[in-house]
Structures are given as structure tokens and as C-alpha cells.
């Protein structure tokens, strides 16, 4: 019986040590385990919770004031450039030369219109493609673009004014 009590006491110490270690290294989990898994007195639990809350508040709250903003720092000395120009003197009878300074202008480009595809009509099993007005075109004749008809090997109809090629 005493060995059973000593095993239970040893297990209880291990559990308490695990909760204490979690309180130190992972406070949220340690608090949860302390309140749900231990039979510690309520005063001890409240004290440990308050201590952890205080420690977190001290860690997360900055202890120093931010540095004060400095005003100024820029001082205008004069409005003329102070540059030494080296080189020969310009002739006195020479007039002043304006330096070219490009202006920003918008370049407006009209977009190139997209060409409309030329629609022709090809009968299945036929050799020619036709325009819509051709006598060989029916309501069921499929329409395709001229480029598709040329790729499929169709030739222009000799009876209607079908275009020769895509330009």
C-alpha cells in the first residue's frame, strides 16, 4: 500500500513540475494546465496568474520614452549657387546662350485599329470558298475566316468575287 502511495506522490510531483515548467516557459499553456489539471489552492492559482500577467505587461510595455523629435536641421544660406567655373573666359562680345531644357509633353498615339476578319463560306466536300452573295452559299453553309479557309486548302470561287488572300 505504501508503494502505491509513493508512486502516486511521485506522479503528482512530476505533474506539478511539468505545470511549473510550462508556467515558466509557455505561460498560456501553463496557466491553462494549472487551472484545469491541478488541485492547488485557489489563492495560489490566482497569485500565479497575477504574477504572469504582471511579467507579460512589463515585457510588452516599453520602459523608455521614445526620443524627442528635433526641430529644424535645415538652414537656407543663400539662393545663388556657389560654383567655381574653370576654363577660358568667354569673349565679351558674345551674347548669352539659352540652355535647352526639354519640356515634358505627352505623346498621344492613336491605336492601330484591329482589322476585321474577312468571312467566307465553305461547303463541306467542296474545293472553293465563297462570298455570302454567291449562288453556291446556302443557309447551312458554315462560315469561316479567309485565313482559315486558305489554311484548309480551299481556293477562291471563280463565279463570285471572293478575295484571293489575306492582306
Image: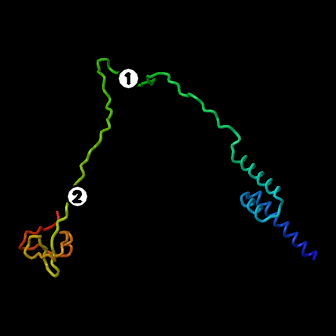
Q: Is residue 82 above or below residue 19?
A: above
Q: Residue at x 7, y 71 (%)?
A: 160
Q: Which residue is mark 2?
A: 114
> Under tag 1, what secondary structure?
loop
Seen from the viewer's position, the closer of residues 140 and 106 is: 140
Q: How is the image coloured?
A: rainbow
Q: Horizontal and vertical percent for residue 16? A: 82, 64
Outermost residue to the right:
2
Q: Quadrant of residue 42?
A: bottom right
Label ID, residue 88: 1
Q: Residue at x 23, y 54 (%)?
A: 112
Locate the C terminus by quadrant.
bottom left
Outermost residue to the bottom:
125
Locate the N terminus by quadrant.
bottom right
Tell me which numbered mark, 2 or 1, is placed earlier along the sequence: 1
Q: Is residue 134 above or below residue 94?
A: below
The answer to whether 31 appears left or right of 100 in the picture is right
Q: Horizontal and vertical percent for residue 102? A: 32, 35
The answer to whether 62 appears left or right of 152 in the picture is right
> Under tag 2, what secondary structure?
loop
Seen from the viewer's position, the closer of residues 15 and 96 is: 15
Q: Is residue 34 above or below residue 57?
A: below
Q: Quadrant of residue 4?
A: bottom right
Seen from the viewer's position, the closer of residues 25 and 75 is: 25
Amino acid at each position: 500500500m505504501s508503494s502505491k502511495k509513493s508512486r502516486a506522490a511521485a506522479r503528482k510531483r512530476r505533474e506539478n513540475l511539468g505545470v511549473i515548467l510550462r508556467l515558466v516557459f509557455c505561460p498560456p499553456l501553463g496557466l491553462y494546465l494549472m487551472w484545469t489539471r491541478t488541485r492547488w489552492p485557489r489563492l495560489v492559482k490566482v497569485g500565479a496568474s497575477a504574477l504572469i500577467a504582471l511579467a507579460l505587461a512589463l515585457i510588452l510595455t516599453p520602459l523608455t520614452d521614445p526620443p524627442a523629435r528635433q526641430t529644424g536641421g535645415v538652414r537656407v544660406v543663400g539662393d545663388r549657387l556657389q560654383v567655381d567655373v574653370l576654363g577660358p573666359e568667354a569673349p565679351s562680345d558674345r551674347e548669352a546662350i539659352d540652355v535647352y531644357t526639354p519640356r515634358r509633353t505627352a505623346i498621344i498615339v492613336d491605336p492601330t485599329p484591329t482589322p476585321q476578319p474577312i468571312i467566307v463560306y465553305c461547303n463541306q466536300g467542296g474545293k472553293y470558298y465563297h462570298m455570302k452573295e454567291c449562288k453556291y452559299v446556302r443557309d447551312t453553309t458554315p462560315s469561316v475566316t479567309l485565313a482559315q479557309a486558305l489554311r484548309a486548302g480551299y481556293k477562291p470561287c471563280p463565279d463570285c468575287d471572293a478575295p484571293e488572300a489575306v492582306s
